[in-house]
Amino acid sequence: QQQVKQSPQSLIVQKGGISIINCAYENTAFDYFPWYQQFPGKGPALLIAIRPDVSEKKEGRFTISFNKSAKQFSLHIMDSQPGDSATYFCAASMSNDYKLSFGAGTTVTVRA
Amino acid sequence: DADVTQTPRNRITKTGKRIMLECSQTKGHDRMYWYRQDPGLGLRLIYYSFDVKDINKGEISDGYSVSRQAQAKFSLSLESAIPNQTALYFCATSDHRGLGETQYFGPGTRLLVL
């Protein structure tokens, strides 16, 4: 049973639009929430991460929003570009063991 | 990431065969992981190792075994391959000396079991 539920499974957005991917978790012991980006034929790579002591973290066009009470977090991709077309995975871990529990992944397609 | 290499990159095998997937890293990390990726299921942890003498089962270890030959090498074996082990396999590493949570993935091995 997946500990982190991710939606949607796929989305298509126009260039310049906003992509939003949502994740939810049940284990309140999770205290680290990364997002990984995977291009076709490549391994996933860390994109951005957040800890629950902040509600938002922004790096360039990528923003994580975190809602501790709802046990949800989301990735927003602003001004989406064709080069952002990839599969995105949310994940969660506890700082005392570092094992990552991944969501099912979202395939984002940005149309030019 | 060229610092984490996996061999072979593609493999076709038959049901019942024993196969080994190999992972090597030059990052100097102490922690290594094996995952499998299936469409709609994301990445699931098979085994992980926090140092050469430490081996731990992940969430889906049945049918798999591992060997940590050195700090830089971590191999995954399928003792008797079956078709539902057809998947994309990833090795990853992380470093406890830093934050410890960033995992660096290899390019993957695509395995087909006939």
Image (tube, grey):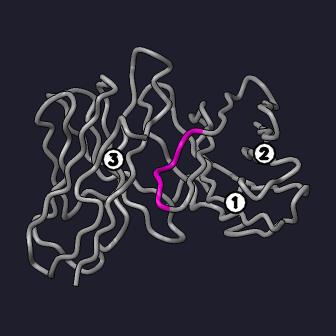
Give SS at disc 1: loop
Whether residue A10 sits left or right of residue B46 in the image: it is right
Whether residue A36 sits left or right of residue B8 in the image: it is right
The reply to whether the C-beta atoms of the residues labelled 2 and 3 are less than 8 Å apart is: no
In whole angstroms, how far apart are the C-alphas of marks 2 and 3?
33 Å
* Mark nearer the viewer, 2 or 1: 1
Labels 1 and 3 within one chain:
no
User: Residue B66's x, y, as percent?
Assistant: 16, 48
Whether residue B16 sits left or right of residue B71 in the image: it is left
In whole angstroms, how far apart are the C-alphas of marks 2 and 1?
29 Å
In whole angstroms, how far apart are the C-alphas of marks 1 and 3?
23 Å
- Residues rendered magenta in the picture: A41-46
The reply to whether the C-beta atoms of the residues labelled 1 and 3 are less than 8 Å apart is: no
In this orientation, which residue lies closer to the viewer: A13 or B63?
A13
Q: Which residue is mark 2?
A: A70
Q: Which residue is mark 3?
A: B91
* Mark nearer the viewer, 2 or 3: 3
User: Residue B84's x, y, as percent?
Assistant: 30, 77
Q: Residue A15 sits in which quadrant?
A: bottom right
Q: Which residue is mark 1?
A: A85
Give the residue at x 57% y 41%: A92
